[in-house]
Amino acid sequence: MKERIEQLKKAIEAFSVKTEKDVEQFRLQFLTKKSELNQLFADFKEVPSELKKELGKELNLLKNFAEETHRVHQETWSSANADAEKDLNDYTLPGYQSGSGNRHPLQIVRNRMTDIFMRMGFDVSEGPEIEDDWHNFSALNFPENHPARDMQDTFFIDADRSLRTHTSSVQVRVMESQKPPIRTISPGRVYRNEAISARSNCFFHQIEGLYIDKGVSFADLKQTLFQFVKEFFGADTQVRFRPSYFPFTEPSAEMDIYLGTGTEADYRLTKGSGWLEILGCGMVDKQVLSNCGIDPETYTGFAFGMGIERITMFQYGVKDLRTFFENDVRFLNQFASV
Ligand code: DAH
């Protein structure tokens, strides 16, 4: 019996399968009622009881082996896979290519941005996406019931907590926990209750920057951001600062870069003006400094915040922001070489 088991194992191994029909042939030969395998199980009854344990085990192993081999043949040669009659023994064929992943475009841009700021001496900090009222609003000079809170449509969780509407909340956390000099950038995801369209989504990504030390001035703010733009968009990029309003900075500004209106895409993106707004910034309001335990008479500082999606769309000519989150590999694979 032992010999018969071994012979059958060899026969199963040697059976060459090259087409879908062979798979069926394999089944007929080894797995039907009339098969040698079945016969072996029938003859097992006659095996002397002292050998039953060992041979029973081997017989079961053989059965598993036959079934498993059949399953593998089936998988390899099912019509879907066997579009050509493959010869598995042709070792000269090139190997199968296994795909490798690549970074998401938003991640690529975020990394480039953080790299530039890190070279200027900034470190990277993070904070929670579920944030309390103090860190997202109150400490940043959005008083309760103040209309400035309407600047950002908020997803509330309960009376005190919401999904953070901006990464400025991380500024507060850093200032509360560190002593100046502080130089940090905080990339992260933020949430706003906005209608979803090609240009806006209910969540997106920002990078926040914060620099606090003795004697930091608006000139430092301009020079830092100017340096960033030159490195990120190219040395010839023109920028302009426009006065603006944010509750947590005074004075506040927005910065635009000049794209021109030469191409239709640039014309549309800049609404015909040639200028693309890329960030908000300003000198950290004195009240915000003291809210966070930093003496505004000794220290000054600047902050800025920019959206990552808009800049990524511009950089790569992506027309619809929603494509970033659909995980369509045909879209994502286009960034494989970046
Ligand atoms: N938090 C602002 C927003 O989400 C962006 C911003 C503006 C951040 C000015 C800043 C700043 O740090 O100084 O719209």
Image (tube, rainbow, N blue to C red):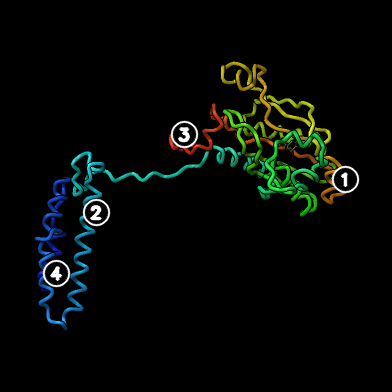
In the picture, measured across the screen, residue 164 lies left or right of residue 76, that is right
Q: Which residue does the image show at 74% across and 50% down from the upper left?
A: 173
Q: Earlier in the sequence, mark 2 or mark 3?
A: 2
Q: Quadrant of residue 260?
A: top right
Whether residue 234 sits left or right of residue 144 in the image: it is: left
- As drawn, the residue found furthest toward the right would be 297
Categorize mark 1 by other alpha carbons within 10 Å: few (<14), some (14-19), many (20+).
some
Q: Which residue in the protein does label 4 denote? A: 41
Alpha-carbon distance for marks 4 and 3?
A: 56 Å
Mark 1 and mark 4 in contact? Answer it, CB < 8 Å. Answer: no
Q: Is residue 267 visible?
A: yes
In which quadrant of the rendered image does the N terminus lie?
Answer: bottom left
State the residue position of label 1.
296
In the picture shown, does residue 36 fall above or below 273? below
Q: Is residue 311 visible?
A: no
Residue 278 location in percent, x, y? 67, 30
Which mark is nearer the camera, 4 or 3?
A: 4
Which residue matches tag 3? 331
Query: Is the residue marked by circle 2 packed among few (<14), some (14-19), or many (20+) residues within 10 Å?
Result: few
Q: CA distance from mark 4 to mark 2?
A: 23 Å
Q: Amino acid at mark 3?
A: Phe
* Marks 1/4: CA–CA distance: 89 Å
Query: Regarding mark 4 in the picture, which secondary structure is present there?
Result: helix
SS state under label 1: loop
